[in-house]
Amino acid sequence: MEALKGKDYGKPRMTYPDYEMTPSGLQYKDMREGTGDKPSQGDTLLVDWDGYTIGYYGRPFEARNKPKGSSFEGSDKDFYRFVLGQHTVIPAFEEAVATMKVGGIRRIVVPVELGYPNNDYKKQGPKPTTFAGERALAFVLGNQGMIDKTLLFDIELMRILK
């Protein structure tokens, strides 16, 4: 992101030894390997997700309180959907999901440059669904101080809609 070049946001980047790092700087760990298909560009994906602010006490900004890895109650409308490759989600989310298989759960550590553009969660998804979540995320992203803007997401790829 051009707007972030030369700016020092928060603490130096942490690398987690049990996570893999992509060339873009995204760190990820598969909590459960999926057994289904991998998505392709243009597929509509159905995912469940939780989001946390790592540098601000690990506060959740979206926690659906559904146990990851078990049978989910609810219908497709309860999950987040987006089209892979249309850039309607933050770059880290798109990069992480592109190599998952259906049924997989991946935890990702998102550096600021792969997060919300211009620190505005309203421009790209995923977006918090509660007022409290919006406030927590907006506080971290909008803070001009030295708060670490690194985010953490747990993503479960539920289904691919062709």
Image (cartoon, helix red, strand yellow):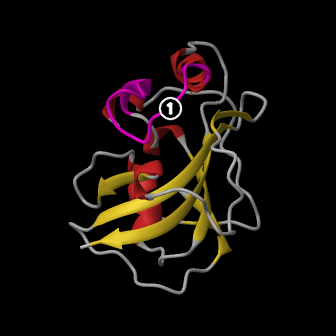
The residues colored magenta run 117-132
| Quadrant housing the N terminus | top left
Report whether residue 18 is seen.
yes
In the image, is residue 47 part of the stretch drawn in magenta?
A: no
Give the x, y percent position of residue 17. Answer: 76, 64
Q: Is residue 29 above or below residue 3?
A: below
Callout count: 1
Residue shown at 47%/85% (left/top)?
Answer: 36
- Where, by quadrant of the figure, is residue 64 drawn? top right
Nearer-the-camera pick, 106 or 67: 67
Q: Residues within 10 Å of mark 1 (few under 14, many from 20)?
A: few
Magenta portion: prevailing SS class: loop
Identify the element where label 1 is drawn: loop
| Quadrant housing the C terminus | bottom left
Nearer-the-camera pick, 74 or 159: 74
Report whether residue 24 is seen.
no
Outermost residue on the top side: it is: 144
Give the x, y percent position of residue 84. Answer: 29, 61
- Where, by quadrant of the figure, is residue 116 drawn? top left
Residue shown at 50%/32% (left/top)?
Answer: 129
Nearer-the-camera pick, 113 or 82: 82
Q: Which residue is mark 1?
A: 129
Q: Amino acid at mark 1?
A: Thr
Residue shown at 22%/53% (left/top)?
Answer: 86
Q: Is residue 112 above or below residue 138?
A: below
Give the x, y percent position of residue 41. Answer: 24, 69
- Where, by quadrant of the figure, is residue 2 drawn? top left
Give the x, y percent position of residue 100. Answer: 48, 74
